[in-house]
């Protein structure tokens, strides 16, 4: 099976989307959180992206934070925020989290220029 078609639990609610792309699209449309844009603007590396997703999962699933409240929290995170260096957030909150497989697929971005090209292509695919 193609990992791009894996069901994916929403980042900010309990809805399961048909794919990570659909999940990211819904996060942007319903919660105004664009994970790809946050990652690009804050120049997050693969480990920081993983920490970000696991942080969202932890706050939502373990801390039971409301999705709208959490979305505002996520949008206000700065690159120097402690979560981006928190080693405990490298451990997945959800086993086989489909969103993490998508982030890892983007890991081999060469430099910023290539990264922007890939980010734009991913964004077009996700938000078409």
Image (cartoon, grey):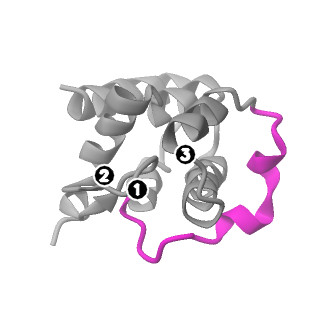
Q: Secondary structure at mark 3?
A: loop
Q: Which numbered disc covers residue 66? A: 3
Nearer-N-terminus badge (3/1) = 3
Q: Which quadrant is home to the N terminus? A: bottom left
Residue extent of the magenta highlight? 79-98
The reply to whether the magenta stretch includes residue 84 is yes
Please tell me which residue is depicted at 78% across the width and 64% down the height of the picture: 87
Specify the quadrant that holds the C terminus. top left
Q: Vertical placement of 27 versus 61: above or below?
A: above
Q: Is there CB contact under 8 Å for labels 3 and 2?
A: no
Q: Is residue 73 left or right of residue 127?
A: right
Q: Estimate how packed mark 2 is, as few (under 14), some (14 to 19) or many (20 or more) residues with alpha carbons within 10 Å.
A: many
Which residue corresponds to mark 2?
A: 20
Label 2, label 1: how many angstroms apart (C-alpha)? 5 Å
Residue linked to disc 1: 99
Question: In this image, 47 relative to 102: left or right?
Answer: right
In the rendered image, residue 47, in percent from the top left (x then y), is placed at 65, 54
Spot occupied by residue 43 in the image (x, y as percentages of width and height): 64, 31
> Between residues 60 and 107, which one lies in front from this camera angle?
60
Dot 3 or dot 2, earlier in sequence: 2
User: Label 3, label 2: how many angstroms apart (C-alpha)?
Assistant: 21 Å
Answer whether residue 111 is visible to the viewer in this image: no
């Amino acid at each position: 099976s193609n990992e791009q078609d894996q069901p994916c639990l929403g980042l900010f609610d309990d809805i399961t989307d048909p794919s990570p792309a659909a999940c990211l699209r819904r996060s942007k449309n319903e919660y105004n959180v664009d994970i790809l844009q946050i990652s690009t603007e804050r120049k997050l590396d693969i480990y920081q992206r993983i920490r970000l997703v696991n942080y969202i999962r932890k706050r939502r699933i373990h801390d039971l934070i409301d999705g709208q409240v959490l979305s505002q929290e996520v949008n206000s995170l700065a690159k120097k925020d402690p979560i981006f260096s928190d080693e405990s957030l490298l451990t997945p909150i959800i086993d086989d989290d489909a969103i993490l497989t998508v982030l890892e697929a983007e890991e081999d971005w060469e430099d910023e220029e290539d990264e922007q090209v890939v980010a734009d292509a991913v964004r077009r695919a996700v938000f078409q």
